[in-house]
Amino acid sequence: MKMQQLWISAFLIAASLVAAFPLLWMLSMSFMPEAEANAFPARLFPHDPTLANYAELFAHQRMGRFLFNSLLVASLATILSLAFNVTAGYAFAKLHFRGREKLFRFLLAVVVIPGQLTMLPLFFQLKTLGLLNSYAGVVVPFMTSLFGIFLVRQYALGLPDEMLQAARVDGASEWQIFRKIVLPNLSPIIVTLGVFTFLAAWNDFLWPLIVLSDDHNYTLPLAIASLSQEHIQDSGMVMACATVTIAPVILLFLALQRHYVRGLLAGSVKG
Amino acid sequence: MTTVRALMRVISPGHVFVAPAMCVLSVFFLMPVLGALVMSFTDFDIYALADLKNLRFIWLGNYINLLQTPLFWKAFGNTCYFALVGAPLSILVSLVMAMALNVPGVGLKALYRTALFAPYVATLVAAAVIWRYMLDAQYGWLNQFLIVIGLHPIDWLGNPRFSMPAIILFSVWKNFGYNMLILLAALQRIPDDLYEAARVDGAGAWARFIHVTLPGLTPVLWMVALLTIAGYFQLFAEPYVMTQGGPAQSTVSLLYFMYEDGFKWWNLGHASATAFILFAVLMGLSFLRPKSEEVFV
């Protein structure tokens, strides 16, 4: 038995190293001077670590601008997604209104439609609205999410009706109940949905690629895609750009891991 | 009773709470879905984009044309290859890792779990860029490894025979963490008594896996398989970043084909037809899902 656990531990250590290796190598290489990054055979660690790659990125490759774009787009997406989905999810769980069941069954039916189906007409729609090449255009598909509505509804179903009823008897309006009682009680699932939306918006590639034509508005994934085409031989700098793109989401995940995994598992049970 | 009914007929707070989300959903999701269907029956192109007066209905013309386009079939085949090989492979890795993480008495599990899950969180495009270097024919670590174990290096992204396997390898690394966590949660729900009973009956490790673990996982495995295959059918960023669909169009996926068709050549009507065919495939997949009763038998 003891022996078996030792083997499993060794296996898990090896697997973890393999899984983390590309990310660790990215980090290590981002500190290598150009000659070391391009050395053959490839090196694991910088002999002479430097911040030159980062300095070059921020000074001459507009990395600060791209970082700002990504932060803005992901934050906007998160705030809007929470505003729309939390109110709707709560209403589907706890407020009675005409057509609720029908509407909810309709949402369950359309959840199978992949977002890619909407891209071509949505592009034309945004062109008509003059939102192409804007932050708003990138954010639009994130504003509502059926997954988000289902996630919040599922969680809100667990709120005790007596609590809401007591507030109603005391004469509180539905809006007051939502703000003062419901929101605080939903805070765990709000964090979950927030992390999910932020990561999805930060990591998204295809939609921003379609909407953004002016590279001034590029988010980080677009920036690294184009940087890696133009500067494939400047591997140290490309790796620094990858680090700037990946590090924030990894750190966010590490900080809010518990909340993220809750959403992941809830989403899978819904399936 | 009638007064209650009359009251119910006027707008209630619930309507006000769902209205904003439903409006956004209608305008930016449902309308485009219908739009895509209409578009796929038209010759929507760059002239129609400039002025809708140039739009003509050609009904099934786009679909008929697509079925006669070799690159469409190439993309369809590539996507099936990627999904039908990549998804099972990634689920297998997820299952092995989940089972290892579920062995009692192994320390530091939280650390391993985080390390194994990290690739899933990492930005897809940036990870694909890193893997271009990992897979480099000369400098890449993968080939260094092959040389160490006595094999010939492979021109992963430059050889049409190996480009799709390389992308599958990358995707398995990138995605297995997600299903690993779902399967781990499912494994933890299998009661210990079942294993204990099997042990008492003299079942070895393999027999316990076949008779206790697998039946306990079946419903979750079905769901994981369908969702993963559906996800893999939406391959795009990997070929865009790593191979630009090449070499010899060996990594052009349906979505990549749709993107180039629609946003490079501005054949939006034609591309909508591709999008609908992809949608039909995904719908077909979702019908494969067995009724839950069947699964539990």
Image (tube, helix red, strand yellow):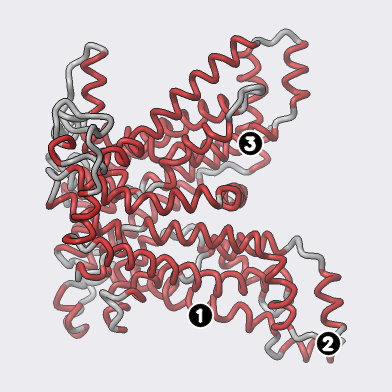
- Which one is in front, B8 or A229? A229
Mark nearest the camera among 2 and 3 is: 2
Q: Which quadrant of the structure image shows residue B162?
A: top left
Q: Amino acid at mark 3?
A: Ala
Mark nearest the camera among 2 and 1 is: 2
Q: Which mark is residue B211?
A: none
- Find residue B258 and report its horizontal and vertical position in percent: 25, 57
Residue marked by disc 3: B186
Q: Residue at x 30, y 59 (%)?
A: A220
Camera sees residue B82: yes
Mark 2 burial class by Cα count in 10 Å: few <14, some 14-19, many 20+: few
Mark nearest the camera among 3 and 1 is: 3
Please say if the residues under marks 2 and 3 sit with CB atoms less than 8 Å apart: no
Residue marked by disc 2: A171
Specify the subunit that label 3 lies on.
Answer: B
SS at circle 3: helix
Q: Residue at x 74, y 25 (%)?
A: B192
Q: Is residue A22 above or below residue A212?
A: above
- Which one is in front, A222 or A27? A27
Residue marked by disc 1: B23
- Find residue A162 and report its horizontal and vertical position in percent: 86, 70
Q: Amino acid at mark 1?
A: Cys
- Which one is in front, A176 or A71? A71
SS at circle 2: loop
- The CA distance from mark 3 to mark 1 is 37 Å
